[in-house]
Image (cartoon, grey):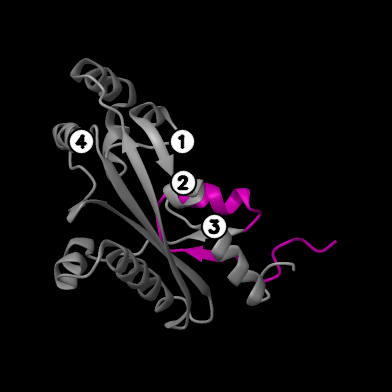
Amino acid sequence: MMGLWLAGQPLVLASRSASRRAVLAGAAIPVEVLPADVDERAIEARAGTKSPSDIALLLARAKAGAVSAKLPGRLVLGADQTLALGDRLFAKPADLAAARDQLKDLRGRTHALHSAVVLVRDGAVLFEHCETARLSMREFSDRFLESYIETVGLAVTASVGGYQVEGAGIQLFERIDGDHFTILGLPLLPLLHHLRRERCLAD
């Protein structure tokens, strides 16, 4: 019996993100994880005045390219996400104090998540796409913020912005506009469409 995944080998995910791996696995795509070793902050610095969505694509492209160079013939997926509040770009908080500061800055305001995916084989870009979601945090109290950080612990440092909407982080928000998979860091439907065009998925 033929499955949904038609390619001879699993898709290589150039990311250590557990949520991206879970999204792909949930879509019945076999995944082999090989995180890319790239200097994200250096890539962002070289990007200069590029938009947050362009920077997300640059990061995803760099990750896919780095892993593709090690795996000839394999289909490699790079993915990355940027969080922007106006013109300000956020990075993952280094510790609990940095996460607290990020959440205070985002509180009561709407920020944008730009999620990019890039498919590469043998160094050649086959597909790239970036989607944006807009998330509005409510005006939560300082007491709630401390309770939230105590509840999620070090997980608050695992994602840019200090939250994961698939967990307790959803309590931070009053409105979310955008695709759920984009918020998780992987615009899935455009990716599936291209994989069908590549004859990697059943049509």
Q: Tell me the residue at 24%/32% (across/down).
A: 108
- Which residue in the protein does label 3 denote? 188
Residue 123's place in the image compared with 203, above or below, is below
Q: Identity of the amino acid at label 2?
A: Ser
Magenta residues?
1-29
Q: Can residue 51 be found in the magenta stretch? A: no
Q: Identity of the amino acid at label 4?
A: Ala
Q: Identity of the amino acid at label 3?
A: Leu
Marks 1 and 2, how far apart at CA: 9 Å
Q: Can residue 11 be found in the magenta stretch? A: yes
Please state which of the two labelled residues, at mark 1 or mark 2, is closer to the viewer.
Answer: 1
Q: Position of residue 27 (x, y in %)?
A: 63, 53
User: Based on the displayed image, in which of its 4 quarters is residue 55 positioned?
Assistant: bottom left
- Which residue in the protein does label 2 denote? 19
Quadrant holding the C terminus = bottom right
Q: Are discs 4 and 3 less than 8 Å apart at CB?
A: no
- Which residue in the protein does label 1 denote? 166
Callout 1 secondary element: loop
Res 99 label: 4
